[in-house]
Structure formats: C-alpha cells, structure tokens
Image: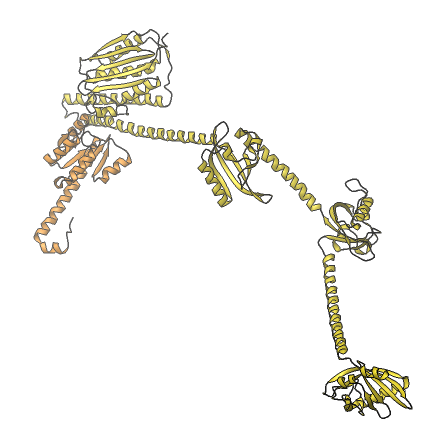
Chain colours: A orange, B yellow
Amino acid sequence: MKKILVIEDEPEMRRNITTLLRYHDYEPVAAANGREGFEAAQREQPDLILCDVTMPELDGYGVLRALQAEASLARIPFIFLTAKGEKNDLRSGMDLGADDYLTKPVANAELVRAIEARLRRAEHQSHREFKVRETRRRNPRRCQDSGTGGA
Amino acid sequence: MFQQLFERSADAIFLFDPAREVFVDCNQAAVEMMRATDRQQLLLVHPAELSPEYQPDGKTSRDKTSEVIDTALAKGSHRFEWMARGMDGNLFPLEVLLTTIHEGERPLMATVCRNITERKLAERQILELNASLEQRVNERTAALQTSEARFRALVEHAPEAIVVFDGDTGRFVFGNEHACRLYGVPMEKLAELTPADVSPEFQPNGRRSSELARELMDEALAGGMSVFEWLHRQQPDGRLIPTEVRLLRLPAEGQNLIRASITDNTERKRAQAALADSEALFSAAFEGSPILIVIARMSDQTYVLVNDAFVKWSGFAREEILGRDSTEFSIWESQDERDEVWADLRRAGSVRERECRLRNRKGDRTTMLISLEVIQINHSPHVLAMGLDITQRKQAEVEILKTLAREKELSQLKSNFVSMVSHEFRTPLGIIQSSAELLREFYQKMQPGQREEQLESIARNTCRMAGMMEGVLVLSRLDAGKLDFHPAALDLNLFCRRVVDEVLSATNRRCAIELTVNAVPVESQADEQLLGHIFTNLLSNAVKYSEPGAMVGLTVERDGQDAVCAVRDRGIGISVEDQRRLFKAFSRGSNVGTRPGTGLGLLLVKRCVELHGGRVKVDSKVGEGTTVMVRLPVFPKEP
C-alpha cells in the first residue's frame, strides 16, 4: 500500500483528502503545517507528497526546498494542491521542481488520477534505475566506457 | 673800332673770299670754336675742309658751299645752318649768317657762326616731347572715347531712368532706355517734351507740375542737388508712377544742362505700405497678445519695450519697467536660473520653451514657459522674450499625475482584491466539492457520523462563502461610494440595545453581553447603517473568539462631540504580528483555529468608522483578550 503524505492546514480539507485516499486504498499520513509535514516526510518516507502552499510555520515552497536539500527525500513525487490559482503561482511552483500543481477546488477523481500518474511514473523511473544499476554491476568495464548512460 | 668788334665778338666770325672759296681771316672765337691751335690753321681753307663730306640735307659740303655763296651774293646776305667739323674731328651744328661786304673792289663775305649744338639739342628734346605729348594725347583721346562709349552704354542701359534736359527751355535733351520706358515715349520723341508733359497736371502736394518742375530746375541750376518725390504719368494709358528724382546740374559750357535720375518708387511705396501694415499688425499682436512679451537690450539687459500682458502680470507701471533690468524687480525666483538662461542665450542665440519660476510685484509665484531670441534693432543686439504663464497648467498636470497615481493604486488594489477574493473562495469551495463528492461516491461505505460531518462541512463552508460575499459586497459598495454617510437623528442607547439583542440571538447566546451607556444624550446624529456594520462585526468577533459563557462588554460614553465605544472580550487575543495585518482584507489571526470567519470584518469596521469621521483603535494580548475602541463624532457641540 502506497503511503501518501498530505500537508494541509485547513482541517476539513485535510480530513476529506485523507478520507478519499483511504477509500482508494492508499495509506494517508496527515500534517497540519509545513514544518510538521517536513518532519513527517523524514519520518515516514512517503511514496508521494500532496502539499498546500499557503500555510503557517513553513509554506509549501519552503517544504519543497527542504525536501530537495535532502537526498533521501528529493526524489519523492511532489504535488501542490492550493487555492493560489494565478498563472505565476503555478509557474513558480513548477519552477521549484514540483511534479504537478493542482488548484482548489479540484474534483476527487482528478486528484486521484494525478496521484496515480505520478506514482506510476516514479515506479518506471526506479525500475529503469534498477536496471541500469544491474547492468553496471554485471559489465562494469562497458558501462565505464560509455559513461554514466541509462537514466 | 670794327676791328675790335671783330676780335672780341663772342660769335665766331670768318672772312670769306667767295672768288677763291677760302677763309681769309677769323677771330679768336672762331679759332676756339673750331678747336684750332691758331688762326693760321683756318686761313686759306675751303669751308668743306672744316666740314663733314655731306651736309644734313645730303648735299656735299663743297656743293653746298657754292650754293650758299650764290644765294648770299644774290640776296646780299643768307642765313643757314651748317654742319661743321672741328679740328678735333667732332661735328657740331652752326647757324651761319653770310653777309656780302665790299673791301675795295674785292667782294668779301662776313661769316658769323654760332654753335647751335645746345639749341639743336633743345629743339630735338622739344620735338621728342611733342611727339610724346602727341602720343599721350592720342592715347588719352582714345581712352576718353572708350570711356565715353562705356559711360554712354552705362547710362543708356542703366537700371534707373536717366534724362538730361535743357535748364533754360525745360526740354529733354537725352533720355536712356529706362527713362523712355518709364515715360512710355520713344527716344526720338523725347526732345519735344518737357517734364510736365510726362506728369499729371498736379503733383500730390497740390502744386501744378509745370510750375513745380520749373522751380526745382532753377534750384538745380543754382547749384543745389535736390532730391524729391515726383509723380509721373506714363504714356499712353496715363498710369501714374510714383518716383524719386535727383536733379544735378551738368558742367557743360554754354549750356544749362540738368541731369535727372529717376527711380520707380512703385515697389518701394508698395513695400512701405506693406511694412506699415505689417508694423501695425505686429504692434497689434504685440500689445494684444495674452503672451508676455518684452524686448531688452543685450548689452545692459534693460527693458526697452514691454507689452500690456507683461505690465499687467508684473504689477509694475510701464514707466517703472522701461530702462531697468529684471534684477531690479526680483522677477526671477532664482538668480542662478536667470544667469543660466542668459548664458544659454548668449551661446546659442536663442532659448526655446524653457520652464522658469518667476514672481511678480505681489510675490505671486508663476511657472513661465519662456522663449528668447536675439534680434537686431538699429544694429544693436536685443533680446525678444516671450513668456506663457503655465502655472495653472502645471498645477493641473500635478493634479492629473496625482489622480492617475491614485487611480493606478486603486486599480491595483482592486485587481489584488479580486485575486484575493478568488483565492479565499477556493478553499471553502474545495471543501464543499470534496465533501459532496465523497458523499456521492462513498455514501454506502461511510458511517452515519461521517456523513453528518461531511454535510456539516458543506453547510459551514457555504455559510463562510456567503459571509465573505456579503463582506466583499459591502466593501465594494463602500469603494464605489454607494455606501455613503447619511447621518440622521438616532437614539444611541436604544440602537445599542437592539444590536446587542441581534448579536445575542445570532450567536445562540454563546456569551453574555454587558451594555453600559454612560451619560449619553438621547439626540445624536449618526448613520444607522454604518453603525450597524461597526457594532455587529465587533460584537460578533468578541463572542466568536471568546470561550462560551465568557463575558463581553460594550461601553458607550460621551467625550465632547464624540461617542467613545469600547468592545471588550477575554478571548484568545491577537498576536502583535497579526495586529500589523489587522485591517488587511482576508487576513486572520494565526490562532483562530476552526473558528469561522472571512478576514473582512475589521476592515469593514475601519472603513465604516472612517466614513463616519471617526477613529478605531485595537488593544489586544494573546490569551488575555481584546478591546476595540471606536470614537465617533455623533453629538452636537456642548452648550
């Protein structure tokens, strides 16, 4: 069961998202602000993070930056879910390196689809990385000659 | 005695024997003349031996001797010239007088000779001089002829009309092409006419042309050089031509000739008229212009001419201004600015549309748009300065800029507000949507309590949105000026009770509200609607952020014309950081938790208080509570 971290300061929203994820067979972990969210990410090593932008203590951008600074967390798929719907908000979110940017209100089905797509892609990627590592292990000389390759 | 005369004569004298053709005697002068050593050398000598072979006329000296002897014998005496040769071999001319004398039977001839070398030389010089003079005369004559032809051509084709007339008869003697054209008369007919024939009967000054012409001619003949205007009449159509005439007596022997040079003044008259018109026009423009115009001398910068507009603006009398410079009136606010303008003018010859700050006698400050130009008046540089008072325009510009800035700020605020509103609406909308969808998709899987929760969320967030919408609407009505200040008589005491009741009812009496009204007069002038927004919001907040059952207080007191209203609670309080953003739209305290709210209430209160001419002040501490003090000028002046 995939573990999804929901970082959202609005209690009802947080509750609804976790309820939705549970019904879709995910294991939700909830955090009420950015700081808590980052701590939960370190602790839980989730498969995906769904994060609000405007929050007390540490905002969504801050969370993303903190995650990227830590190698073990930097590759976790990250989706912004926010009320900030302006084009430049989306642009700055994506520029920071988010994998997706959803604007409230979002239909439950759309939210689930976005989560599934990011998880699938992440899986592909880790599979490919695994294969590269395997090839390298078996033919170290050839891989050295052709550079890093693979990914 | 004759012997003595013979011997001492300064002239050389020979005695000549015509029969033998030899000299028989001579005096001392003859010896000297012939450069002989003594008399003997010359005696019994044929004259040809004392002469060159040929005489100047080409005859031999011997033949010539016979010839002159014959002539002298026939006539008694004969005077002739002879070329002699001295004993030293030099030739010299002689004038000889040969006279026949009789000494007994034997005829002798006295030959008196005079050396005429000098005379001949003088004669030759005279001849040469004459030749040279003749040549010079010839040259001069030729030059004069050329010069006359040239002058004649000049006169005939001169651009001005030139006529010569006989001062006695008054008739024309000569007229050049131009004159004939001017008069409209062929040259050959001119000699029949007098100046009066080519003029109208009367001149513009009323004098008869013929009489006036006679007078002017007499004046010229008397040696005067007269210049006057004359109206000519052109043949054959009688067109009148204004002219300027110069009369001059010509130096001519035996004749009283007068030369007249005539200039056609038609164009000049027209130009003069045009100039006069133009001057009148410029003068009218100068004086009538609403633009300030002055002319000042460059050398000392003193005013020489100022127009009415300048006089009016300056507040000085024209006579006070003229002859003085601007520094004497302190017209320039800044001496540096004045110096700079003058420097630029001197450098470039003109200054265009420079904004300057000037002031007049009263000290009124004026922004003047000035242009300066260096012009020449009587060959002396002057400055023509024009100024346009743009003070009002500048003020209007400043106002427009201010208004524009305000408009821009407002429009920015509005656009920010719209984006803020849309942002704030997204969160409750998101909750409503997700709750509704959860209910729809997983209704069966949900526990009854969970369904209840979702429905509650929908209802609460719908209410929150409605509240926001209400707040935004009120604010937008305030912004649009639709919610205005309309004071009316109001009993503040009664009004407060009613608001308290309404809030108690709306909050399900979550908190008790204690109303204290101290010495407030029955009469007050207030806008009930604005007051309603103020008190409802403040009391609702106080109840919302207090624990259930806590006490909320509303105190109303009079302070002069003001009603001082304080709403106190012992609720959660507002942090210092949040207090800074207290009146910002949608800004809410970080400690509000799940308490519903829009973040618009206090902004609304502030706007209504300001519209009412009052002030609002918040005093709060986290965990201790909040007091909002509102001061509203609603009471009449105390007697």
> On the rendered image, what quadrant is the C terminus of chain B found in?
top left
Relative depth, front residue between B80 and B344:
B80
In the current view of this chain or complex, which residue is farthest to the right? B105
Q: Is residue B500 left or right of residue B326?
A: left
Q: Is residue B337 left or right of residue B436?
A: right
In the current view of this chain or complex, which residue is farthest to the left? A138
B408 w.r.t. B211: above or below: above
B476 w.r.t. B70: above or below: above
Give the image location of residue B365, x and y in percent: 47, 30
Which residue does the image show at 76% across and 78% down from the upper left? B120
Number of on-image labels: 0
Q: Is residue B174 left or right of residue B606?
A: right
Relative depth, front residue between B242 and B416:
B242
Give the image location of residue A31, x and y in percent: 15, 30
> On the rendered image, what quadrant is the N terminus of chain B found in?
bottom right
Give the image location of residue A129, x and y in percent: 13, 46
Relative depth, front residue between B516 and A8:
B516
Judge whether residue B310 can be spotted in this image.
yes
Which residue does the image show at 84% across and 91% down from the upper left? B21
Q: Quadrant of residue B462?
A: top left
Q: Quadrant of residue B466?
A: top left
Q: Quadrant of residue A114?
A: top left
Judge whether residue B60 can be spotted in this image.
no
Give the image location of residue A24, x and y in percent: 15, 32
